[in-house]
Amino acid sequence: MKITDVRVRKVTKQGKMRAVVSVTFDNEFVVHDIKVIEGERGLFIAMPSKKSSDGEYRDIAHPINSDMRGVLQSTILEAYDKAADEPEGESGE
């Protein structure tokens, strides 16, 4: 499965979230609402999640192994870096 498109929507600085990203795989499947977060050790991604009845947040979609997570995170952060130089709005088009 190949990442064929990454769309970055930067957000104005509010808290630690820096962008919301949509990633397309094989030009056939898209995952929306991946977040770029600024942490203590730099930027990282947070997969889309929803709050369960017990108050915990659970990922709706996520990589199964660390290799795929690494590929996904590096691809997203590279697209974010490119978008960081562009005006506010959506990039990756």
Image (cartoon, helix red, strand yellow):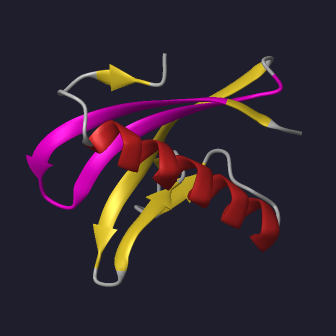
In this rendering, does residue 73 appear at all? yes
* Residue 82 place in picture, x, y as percent: 39, 42
32 falls in the magenta region: no
* Residue 86 place in picture, x, y as percent: 25, 31
Name the image quarter holding residue 55.
Answer: bottom left
Q: Is residue 64 left or right of residue 52?
A: right
* Residue 1 place in picture, x, y as percent: 89, 39
Residue drawn at point x = 38 percent, y = 53 percent = 36
Residue drawn at point x = 67 percent, y = 45 percent = 61
Relative height, residue 27 to residue 55 (above, below) = above
Relative height, residue 66 to residue 13 (above, below) = below
Relative height, residue 79 to residue 74 (above, below) = above
In the rendered structure, which segment of residues is drawn in magenta? 5-26
Q: Is residue 16 left or right of residue 46?
A: left
Residue drawn at point x = 44 percent, y = 66 percent = 44
12 falls in the magenta region: yes
In this rendering, does residue 52 appear at all? no
* Residue 49 place in picture, x, y as percent: 51, 48
Predominant secondary structure, magenta span: strand
Q: Nearer the viewer, residue 1 or 55?
A: 1
